[in-house]
Image (cartoon, grey):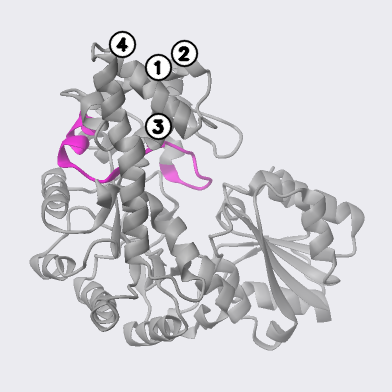
Amino acid sequence: MTILLSTLNARYTHASLGLRYLQANMGELQAQTKLQEFVIGARASDIVERLLAHQPRIVGFGVYIWNVEETTKVVALLKRVAPQVTVVLGGPEVSYEPEGQDIVKLADYLVTGWGEVTFPALCKQILHGPKPLMKIHAGVQPPLEDLITPYDLYTDEDIKHRTLYVEASRGCPFKCEFCLSSLDKTAWPFDIDHFLGQMEALHARGARLFKFVDRTFNLNVKVSLKIMQFFLDKLAANPDDPVYAHFEVVPDHLPEALRESILQFPPGTLQFEIGIQSFNPEVQTLVSRRQNNEKAAENIRWLCDNSHAHLHVDLIAGLPGEDVASFAQGFDKLVALGPHEIQFGILKRLRGTPIIRHTEEYKLVFDPYPPYSILATDRIDFGEMQQLVRFARYWDLVANSGRFSNTLPVILGATPFANFMRLSNWLYETTDATNRIALEKLAMLVTQWLTLEGMSAETAKELVRSDYAGQAHRARQQVTKEVPGKDGAAVAASGRNERQARHLAA
């Protein structure tokens, strides 16, 4: 009577923390519970065949915005060829507004919200009776100390080749209306000493890449300092075998004690994801986002000028109340601060988020299909929004990739948004494509653009060549230098740090 836990990850290098939490908390059913992950893009028939090879009685699927369409096909096929298998769904995509969702109609049961208590209880009923009468089961949220954490379920293969997701806390105290975390009442911390003991065990097994999923890592500075000291101790003890930590931080909260800790991290070991989303105070108020913009800008500038932390800073286009001119102003301000990467996102209507309350007043039009991206607002029409979507894609290829570090400042000039938008529009007119553009072709196109802008052909070629040839070589040296490569770690680390290494080599 095997119970299978499964999901379709966005990439192989992603390892599902949620499924491992379920597996760790299965209690007496854990011995018969197995985990099998797939990657989006796999054929539904191949996935179903591999699932059925375990002869499962129950299959539980983790459903997210990035995999719901493909998981729907898998569930439909599974129920057609093996109707005796009970399908249970969970995850954020199906936890809200489940009515009308095709995948929910196909499944036997749905657990909404937290699943560590409710899913095992549901499985017991399915296997031993009495059979549950209700299809939808609201997840029980237990105290965090009652949860069994899943870190020992990361396999040696996971440790060698995949990102290890960890969490020192759950939830978020902020109420930003575009985010599912706005539905949380607060943030709940795990016992820090117990948590660090588990991180110690992972490190002893060879783990070197830790990605924290905490929404507000630096909210409790005492806890943040303890965690960062853990990594600093590992770096001091093993400088030739460094750890790498990724945190999501609140942009306007960087007290002196935290700054002093950050300064101690060497290059290539610390990454911050910082959500700005918008610099427009009226927009921030409209979507219930509390943020001191001056303090946030000061902190980002300080991190860029003084620390070795690699910075990913997020902006969202299409928020209610913001037009292109306002977004451009915020974008230019952020470029001037100098983060390594600007993650240019397009607003998405995540199921259950309060952003929907602005639909009528601000004429928000969302794509009805995942990932439910904004198509138009009263301030940005459909054509302009499509231009922004293409801008985001080309920005990732040219700017965030780190492949054009010498050329990018020339492209951006004194008005970064306007100048890159002109390049973006030209690239689309020239190629009619926003993906599958080979690096050689992209370099040629950027060179051609520079000559159209008035640069001599030879100067443009030399400028792009300084990035295209030299930068890639220096990045390879940086990755090799940072990661000595033992027990398979070199392959995983090379892939995960390649983009960051290009920025470090600039």
Task: Tell me the quadrant of the picture where the C terminus can be found.
Answer: top left
Front residue of 461/31: it is: 461
Q: Which residue is mark 1?
A: 425
Residue flagged by tag 4: what amino acid is it?
Leu
Residue at screen point 44% across, 32% down? 393
Residue flagged by tag 3: what amino acid is it?
Ala
Residue 337 in the magenta stretch? The answer is yes
First in sequence: mark 3 vs mark 2: 3
Residue flagged by tag 2: what amino acid is it?
Glu
Instruction: Tell me if mark 4 has few (under 14), some (14-19) or many (20+) residues whose alpha carbon lies within 10 angstroms of its own.
Output: few
Q: Residue furthest left?
A: 256
Instruction: Tell me the SS state at disc 4.
Output: helix
How many discs appear?
Answer: 4
Q: Which residue is mark 4?
A: 452
Give the residues in magenta: 329-354
Query: Are discs 2 and 1 less than 8 Å apart at CB?
Result: yes
Up-down relation of residue 407 to residue 500 (above or below): above
Answer yes or no: is residue 299 visible. Answer: yes
Front residue of 296/495: it is: 495
Residue flagged by tag 1: what amino acid is it?
Asn
Q: Which residue is mark 3?
A: 392
Q: Which residue is mark 2?
A: 429
Instruction: Tell me if mark 3 has few (under 14), some (14-19) or many (20+) residues whose alpha carbon lies within 10 angstroms of its own.
Output: many
Residue 381 as seen in the image, left or right of residue 257: right
